[in-house]
Image: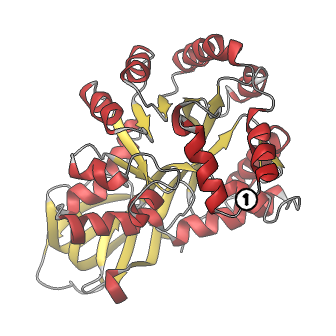
Amino acid sequence: MEQRIFSQNIVTPHGLVRGEVVVRGEVMLAVEPRDGPSAGAQDWGVDWLIPGLVDIHTDNLEKHYQPRPGALWDAYGAALAHDGQCASAGITTVLDSLSLHGRKEGLDRKEALAPMIAGMDSAQADGALRAEHLLHLRCEVTNPELLTLLEPHADNPRLKLLSVMDHTPGQRQTTNVEALETRMVAAGRSEAEIEEMLARRHAGRDPSVAQSNRRSVVAFAREYGVPICAHDDATLEHVQEAHDDGCVIAEFPVTLEAALKSKAHGMAICMGGPNFVRGGSHSGNLSARECAQHDVLDILASDYVPLSMLRSAFMLIDDMGWTPQKALATVAATPARSLGLNDRGEIAPGQRADLVRVARRSAGWPVPTEVWLKGRRTA
């Protein structure tokens, strides 16, 4: 079955085109310049036609599995709720990013890991989802149980990304513990609460296993052909290690020095959409906007706000003067290519027909009004 969609603003790899996208089955056949819609074509008018977004890092599934501290939800239902929020934000490929360590707001991530993965596996197998969900496992190298949590998922066909990280207070993201404590005080935390919070962040960690775990994760990635990314690199030494390990993405570098060196080594720089929209990192580290200003911003991930990806891309166009194709590449083509997903991320012949219709609203807000996955409207 052939479908045609007309838009005055089609974002192609070469720029904006006024014309029609021709879809047959699950793929795009052509982008045809036209002044107006042909007979039978859908007319999206001035609304933008962009590729479906590709999100390589989101913690959002955890929020739906535990919607309130201590209150767990059904894993299948959590998958549906998370999926709906992603699809409505224009995200058609999602890497659910699950941590293999610790607790967050009372959620025991070790206990939650298998149910969350199984719930998403089941929902996807049932055809109940509106986006395609892949898997990103976040490997906390100081966790003595890391490999026992990682290895059971080696054969999951959804596993498309691994990251190596160390969130121990005093390392990388929280190098300056005093600054962390200052932020906690500003947030109204008491001295006792701060001590308890830091104790929780240290719990279950063994720094002596960090290097051996990192080597094992790198070996695992090479054995199973899974791309690997560095996380929260702060120093040139961190970046060199990531390069030597074969990391293809530098995820959330915490200093400009690390971002520039990672880029020089050929790694794609990934920053968080919320960081970009808010104008800075919530933890006081490198700003995504500063990366954009130095032209070392390659990928924007939703991190913890699905709508932040689309908002960031249009802010790059409106506020920073980026071309539409360059801005949209940060949330579609570049993340897809970094994972070897060459069948999506662009409005071009032969690409999967993952499409988003975007209306511009008050204050320039881009609002997804239609979302298509593989040539079929899902949201």
Residue 241 appears anywhere in the view: yes
Measured along the vertical axis of the image, is residue 186 above or below residue 369?
A: above
Measured along the vertical axis of the image, is residue 376 above or below residue 243?
A: below
User: Which residue is tagged 1?
Assistant: 189
Residue 158 appears anywhere in the view: no
What residue is drawn where x is 88% and y is 62%? 71
Position in image of residue 78 (x %, y %): 76, 61
Question: Which amino acid type is shown beneath numbered disc 1?
Answer: Arg
Bin the neighbour count of mark 1 within 10 Å (Cα to Cα): few under 14, some 14-19, many 20 and up: some
Residue 238 image-quadrant placement = top left
User: As rendered, which of 118 and 85 lies closer to the eye?
Assistant: 85
- SS for tag 1? loop
User: As rendered, which of 255 and 324 lies closer to the eye?
Assistant: 255
What residue is drawn where x is 37% and y is 76%? 357
Query: Could you tell whether 28 is left or right of 226 in the image?
Result: left
Position in image of residue 304 (x %, y %): 57, 58
Residue 72 image-quadrant placement = bottom right
Position in image of residue 360 (x %, y %): 33, 83
What residue is drawn where x is 48% and y is 62%? 91
Q: Quadrant of the N terminus?
A: bottom left
